């Protein structure tokens, strides 16, 4: 499977090329950079939060060392401010370098048996694939967090 590039990576590339510490952009300018309109969710302040749970923030500005600031929803304008590179280390990379957590309870079965149980509880491989496709759509910014939750609940109720 070939993974598609997030549409917000276009914004990341734009910001990465800048040789300034701060830039003020309008929503229209951001849409020009993306080559498409911002989603409806971008009209809410929370969408512009510098949060590792916002896939568009990670792919759009955080992973390349920028943060949003001074978001003015009425004027549809905000600042992007360059941050220290050590603070901009990708969240995914940080999680890979973290030491593994030790379980308080020893495993009583092999990993493959545990995995088989998880797959069976999810409703089988086909259902699990459907879950993964929905999560992938969210990770690529195709659906919002709310839509992700709705889709996962729908799939959960279908498995019974």
Image (cartoon, rainbow, N blue to C red):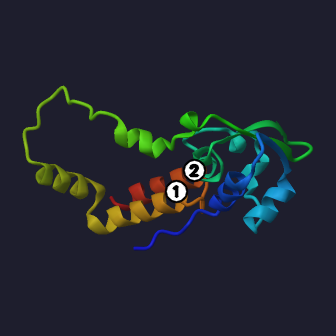
- Residue under pointer 2: 55
| Dot 1: element | helix
| Dot 2: element | helix
What percent of the width, then of the height, locates residue 58?
58, 48
- Residue under pointer 1: 139
Going 18% across and 26% down the picture, which residue do you hit? 104
Question: In the rendered view of the protein, which quadrant contains the N terminus?
Answer: bottom left
Give left or right: position of 112 versus 42: left
Q: Is residue 63 above or below residue 6?
A: above
- Tell which residue pokes out farthest to the bottom in this image: 1
Q: Is residue 61 above or below residue 8?
A: above
What percent of the width, then of the height, locates residue 155?
42, 59
- Tell which residue pokes out farthest to the top in this image: 104
What percent of the width, then of the height, locates residue 19?
75, 48
Going 28% across and 60% down the picture, which residue do you hit? 123
- Tell which residue pokes out farthest to the front in this image: 19
Give the Cα separation between the discs numbered 2 and 1: 6 Å
What percent of the width, then of the height, locates residue 154?
47, 58
């Amino acid at each position: 499977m070939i993974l598609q590039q997030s549409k917000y990576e276009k914004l990341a590339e734009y910001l990465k090329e800048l040789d300034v510490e701060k830039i003020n952009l309008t929503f229209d300018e951001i849409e020009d950079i993306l080559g498409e309109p911002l989603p409806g969710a971008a009209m809410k302040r929370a969408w512009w939060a510098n949060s590792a749970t916002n896939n568009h923030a990670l792919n759009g500005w955080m992973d390349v060392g920028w943060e949003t600031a001074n978001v003015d929803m009425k004027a549809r304008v905000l600042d992007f401010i360059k941050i220290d590179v050590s603070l901009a280390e990708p969240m995914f990379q940080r999680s890979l370098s973290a030491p593994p957590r030790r379980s308080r309870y020893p495993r009583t079965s092999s990993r493959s048996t545990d995995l088989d149980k998880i797959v069976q509880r999810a409703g089988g491989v086909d259902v699990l694939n459907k879950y993964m496709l929905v999560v992938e759509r969210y990770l690529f910014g195709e659906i919002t967090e709310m839509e992700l939750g709705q889709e996962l609940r729908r799939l959960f109720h279908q498995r019974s």
